Image (spheres, grey):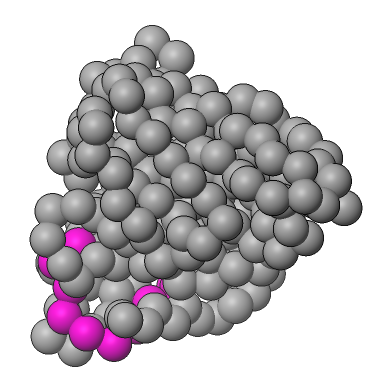
Amino acid sequence: GIQVEQSPPDLILQEGANSTLRCNFSDSVNNLQWFHQNPWGQLINLFYIPSGTKQNGRLSATTVATERYSLLYISSSQTTDSGVYFCAVDSGGSNYKLTFGKGTLLTVNP
Amino acid sequence: NAGVTQTPKFRILKIGQSMTLQCTQDMNHNYMYWYRQDPGMGLKLIYYSVGAGITDKGEVPNGYNVSRSTTEDFPLRLELAAPSQTSVYFCASRILHTIYFGEGSWLTVV
């Protein structure tokens, strides 16, 4: 099956810093999503981005499908950005059988 | 509108016991999913359903069963619990590209 690799595995920032998280995938995809899991375990959709660039406030994401990678940018980080960021992909049809990466654990210190 | 509701939130099972994790959504979504998350790992798909009466296996279905008699409910059954099933379980439903996760069920098998 498709492989998803995320880097870095861990990242520690001071509040206000910027960061870039990377997701590499091993095959062409129809669906790529970024999720945030907060320290209490809650999972939230951030972006649906199989290609192109999207922005939502301080977060933006870019997927270069032809080169099989996606980047998540976090600008002016806040302590509430802490948690695990997951990339998930689906190379199949419409059933959204997502394959998740292992995530990047982000810690933002005040 | 409660979203996706999972019960119980925490449970300790003895080896060989059986139990059902309940999942209900009130958004009338056809697509529903069960994932498990082991420490330091991403989510792995156990089973999914594309509508009432239709279920299919995901990546890690062994030791689990599901049913989908109504659009709202998608229970996950663990038969003969094993220590390898100690994990956090997430139920989710989907509409278009947005996935809604429940808050998770922490299960320990001892």
Q: Quadrant of residue B105?
A: top right
Relative to residue B83, is residue A2 depicted above or below? below
Q: Residue furthest top?
A: B1
Q: Residue at x 57, y 56 (%)?
A: B63
- Which portion, as a residue range, is magenta? A17-31
Question: Camera-side residue: A52 or B36?
Answer: B36
Total numbered badges shown on the rendered structure: 0
- Residue B15 at least partly seen: yes
Residue A29 x, y percent position in the rendering: 18, 73
Q: Is residue A18 visible?
A: no
B80 vs A61, left or right, is right
Q: Is residue B38 above or below residue B104?
A: below
Relative placement, left or right, of A22 versus A94 is: right
Vertical placement of residue A22 versus B72, above or below: below
Viewer-side residue, B38 vs B11: B11
Q: Quadrant of residue A67?
A: bottom left
- Residue at figure coordinates x 19%, y 71% from the top left: A91
Q: What x and y, as percent, mark residue B94?
A: 27, 38
Reply yes or no: does residue A30 show up in magenta.
Answer: yes
**In the depicted view, which residue is nearer to us: B105 or A6?**
B105
Percent x, y for residue A83? 61, 54
Residue A60: where, in percent of width, then height?
Answer: 31, 58
The residue that appears at 82% across and 52% down in the rendered structure is: B15
At a point 16% along the width and 40% down the height, the residue shown is B96
Q: Is residue A30 above or below residue B68?
A: below
Q: Is residue B102 left or right of residue B93?
A: right
Left or right: where B12 falls relative to B102: right
B104 in magenta: no
Which of the image's four quarters has the N terminus of chain B? Answer: top left
